[in-house]
Amino acid sequence: MKLLGAPASPFVRKVRVLALELGLDLPFETVATVTSTDLPLLNPLAKIPTLVRDDGPAIYDSAVICDYLNALAGGSLLPAAGEDRWRALTLEALSDGLCDAAVWRRGEMARPAGDGHTDALEKQRKLVGRALDALEAQVETFTSFGVGEIAAACSVAYLDFRFPNEPWRPTHPKLAAGFARVAERASMKVTEPV
């Protein structure tokens, strides 16, 4: 089994952090999504992360991979049922949505100015802001470092990595304090993009 991805992807990082927290030895292979000829054969969407398994077809989408790895390791980072499961999955979805908007913005910002996409960039910037506000309002309910909290940590870390000139900490102090604590975890440090 191995994980295909790019070290800078917040979705790949989420899977890698979760695997480390579960104590799984998950080999990681960097793959260029644009030039890879093998990735579309494993994942018709040609997206990362993609988990290549020895005993079955590849699994893709970070949320699905995290659920699979959690089940494989005995289920300690995602509750199996009940309200705690829905809270964890909703927190993961919120954090993934933040990443979707940030990754899209990053790609669009590379386009030449004057393409008429300014409104779309602003819409995604506002989406990131609303997601940060929601995380700020919920951070005191984070009682563990499960899949939702991992996704939240990787999402704000991605903002630090790709948008250093757009500081989010001054307006989200509780989230900043919570992130400061989990950023020191070994799983977060070893997966930090450079």
Image: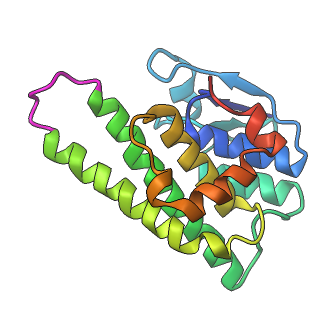
The image shows a total of numbered marks equal to: 0
Q: Is residue 111 magenta?
A: yes
Q: Position of residue 163 (x, y in %)?
A: 43, 36
Q: Give residue 19's quadrant in the image.
A: top right
Q: Position of residue 113 (x, y in %)?
A: 14, 25
Q: Is residue 118 above or below residue 171?
A: above
Left or right, 18 with respect to 156, comes to: right
Q: Is residue 158 magenta?
A: no
In percent of the image, x 55 and y 48: which residue is there? 155
Q: Main secondary structure of the magenta part?
A: loop
Q: Give residue 189's quadrant in the image.
A: top right
Left or right, 111 with respect to 182, comes to: left
Q: Quadrant of the N terminus?
A: top right
Q: Position of residue 179 (x, y in %)?
A: 65, 53
Let me know if residue 2 appears in the view.
Answer: no
Give the magenta range: 110-117
Q: Position of residue 45 (x, y in %)?
A: 46, 37
Q: Quadrant of the C terminus?
A: top right
Query: Which of the pair 138/148 is nearer the observer?
Result: 138
Q: Give residue 148's quadrant in the image.
A: bottom right
- Chosen colour scheme: rainbow
In percent of the image, x 69 and y 70: which residue is there? 142
Left or right, 123 with respect to 2, comes to: left
Let me know if residue 25 appears in the view.
Answer: yes
Q: Residue furthest bottom?
A: 82
In percent of the image, x 53 and y 19: which residue is there? 32
Query: Which of the pair 186/37 is nearer the observer?
Result: 186
Q: Is residue 68 above or below residue 135?
A: above
